[in-house]
Amino acid sequence: EAGVSVLLLRACLALLASPIYLLSFLGMWEPFCRKVFYPFIIEKIGVVHGKKSKKHKQELFRNLPSFRGPSGELRLLEIGTGGGSNFQFYPAGCKVICTDINPHFQEGLSRNMKKNQHLHYERFLVAAGEDLGQVASGSVDAVVCTLVLCSVHSVSSTLREVLRVLRPGGAFYFLEHVAAERSSWQYFWQQVCYPTWKLVFAGCCLTRELWKNLEEAKFSELKIQHISMAMPWMPIEAHIVGYGVK
């Protein structure tokens, strides 16, 4: 019953989004999405999400200074920096390495860098979460990843890279939208929107149970909290937030 409804509603949604499917078929959507649409829409959604998640992020990053390295400085690597919406939450003097698979966030990024001069920006790497080869093993005190694990090709490979670049005792901070409770209406709508959403939002998967990947990764200590953040007209209410220690 539910399966049939999901397929029917998926077809309706695909029909509504048919121009995008056509552009995708012609190979024109992906470059346009990466360059123009995605940075633009993510900034707009980011404003709404930023307001909803602000208190969660303040709480999450509060203990960042306690992970300073032996030298007393805090070296932080952010996966999927985007426009730099997390910079405001990092402690003064923190050294930041920015990475993103998409180099087209420059405008928002430089704006946020100017706003947050309490940080030292070390470098910007165009890199996927699964391949941080340009970063030495055990060289950072903290890794941050917010709303990124939904769209990496492999969550487990990304977490392996996180653990590789972290020094022993370093921490991985995350805030991610995840699959809703399977018996809920929200999960039903996530199933309906899944294919079209993934196409429109550059590979973002709505139904990943990311807490399972985190539990399977080799963290010595892991704190995960399941929270709900209502996003108007968007099937991304269920979130997890927390950190893992190497």
Image (cartoon, grey):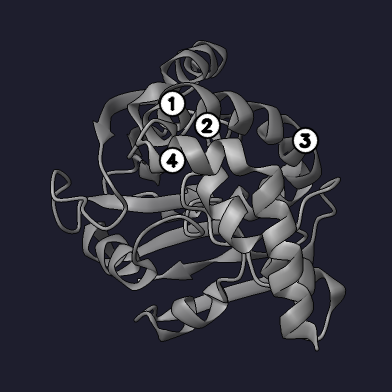
Q: Could you classify mark 1 by the number of other residues whose Cα lies within 10 Å: few (under 14), some (14-19), or many (20 or more)?
A: few
Sequence-wise, which precedes: disc 2 or disc 3? 2
Instruction: Give the residue pinned by disc 2.
Output: 38
Question: Image check: 4 left or right of 77?
Answer: right
Instruction: Give the residue pinned by disc 1.
Output: 32
Image mark for residue 48: 3
Question: Image check: 27 left or right of 54?
Answer: left
**Mark 1 near mark 2, Cβ–Cβ under 8 Å?**
no
Q: Quadrant of the N terminus?
A: bottom right
Sequence-wise, which precedes: disc 1 or disc 2? 1
Of tags 1 and 2, the one toward the viewer is 1
Q: Amino acid at mark 2?
A: Tyr
Quarter of the figure with residue 217: bottom left
Q: Quadrant of the C terminus?
A: bottom left
* Residue toward you, 51 or 87: 51
Instruction: Give the residue pinned by disc 4.
Output: 24
